Amino acid sequence: MAKKISASLTTTTTASEASSAASRQSALAAELREKVDTLLSALREQLHYAQRVAALAKRRAQAVAAGRLHERDLCLDLQREVLQDYFLVERERIACLAEIGLLLGSERPSRVRIAQLVLFVEPEQRDELLEVRESLRDVADCLESLRAWGGRLDHPSAGRVTLFIEPETESPSRHWLREHFDRLRRNAGSSGSADPSRPPLAESSDD
């Protein structure tokens, strides 16, 4: 009789532990799903700002080519404002990513990459993450092309005659934008920062 009672208690305990583990797993999955939704919201917002920056960069390059210097300066000011908004969202994204990393038990929570995160999320969220990452990469490529083209305008070779040449000394506003374009590209390279210009979780060199 004693053995039967002991076996019954063991079975009950095992079933209870299994139920408790299942409940914890379910709660963990729900929390992860919620945090990834928050992350996706931040990434979409960053993509929006990055696309605005790219549009302004294109407009600025066209203004430089046409000698419309007032329009060029206006675009620089607008780009600076948009980038400030972008990096406000960037801080939110990094904080959200760190929470997700902690939830997944990562040793470096804020450095979790999309390639790692998609292994733990549902198919719908996985597809959205990958889609946003590719869109951010497209914006990064666009900005890089415009920057390279703008560099040729700003620093023409000796054998080229140009009517409109910007000063060789980089202005403070231009220097500020160049630094932030570099940061944008780096952010698109890792999810710990989405390295909109290559923005976070858009990796420059991932799978």
Image (cartoon, rainbow, N blue to C red):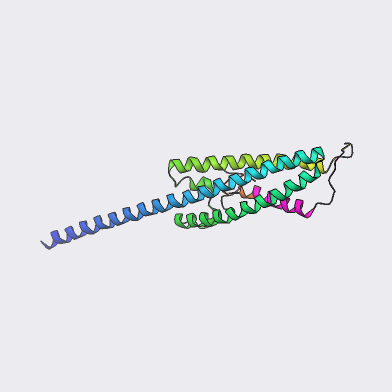
Left/right of residue 188 with respect to residue 68 in the rendered view: left
Left/right of residue 8 with respect to residue 155 in the rendered view: left
**Is the N terminus in the top left, top right, bottom left or bottom right quadrant?**
bottom left
Name the foreground residue: 163 vs 21: 163
Q: Which residues are magenta?
A: 163-184
In the current view of this chain or complex, which residue is farthest to the bottom?
Answer: 2
**Is the C terminus in the top left, top right, bottom left or bottom right quadrant?**
top right
Q: What residue appears at the point 73 percent right and 54 percent down from the top-left corner? A: 176
In the current view of this chain or complex, which residue is farthest to the left?
Answer: 1
Q: Quadrant of residue 10?
A: bottom left
What percent of the width, then of the height, locates residue 135? Answer: 58, 40
Name above or below for residue 124 compared with residue 36: above
Q: What residue appears at the point 46 percent right and 43 percent down from the top-left corner? A: 125
Name above or below for residue 61 compared with residue 31: above
Q: What residue appears at the point 63 percent right and 41 percent down from the top-left corner? A: 139
What percent of the width, then of the height, locates residue 45? Answer: 56, 47
Q: Is residue 82 something that shows in the picture?
A: yes
Left/right of residue 109 with respect to residue 163 in the rendered view: left
Residue 107 shown in magenta: no
Q: What residue appears at the point 55 percent right and 45 percent down from the top-left corner? A: 44
Q: Quadrant of residue 111?
A: bottom right
In the current view of this chain or complex, which residue is farthest to the top?
Answer: 160
What percent of the width, then of the height, locates residue 162? Answer: 87, 38
Name the foreground residue: 57 vs 125: 57
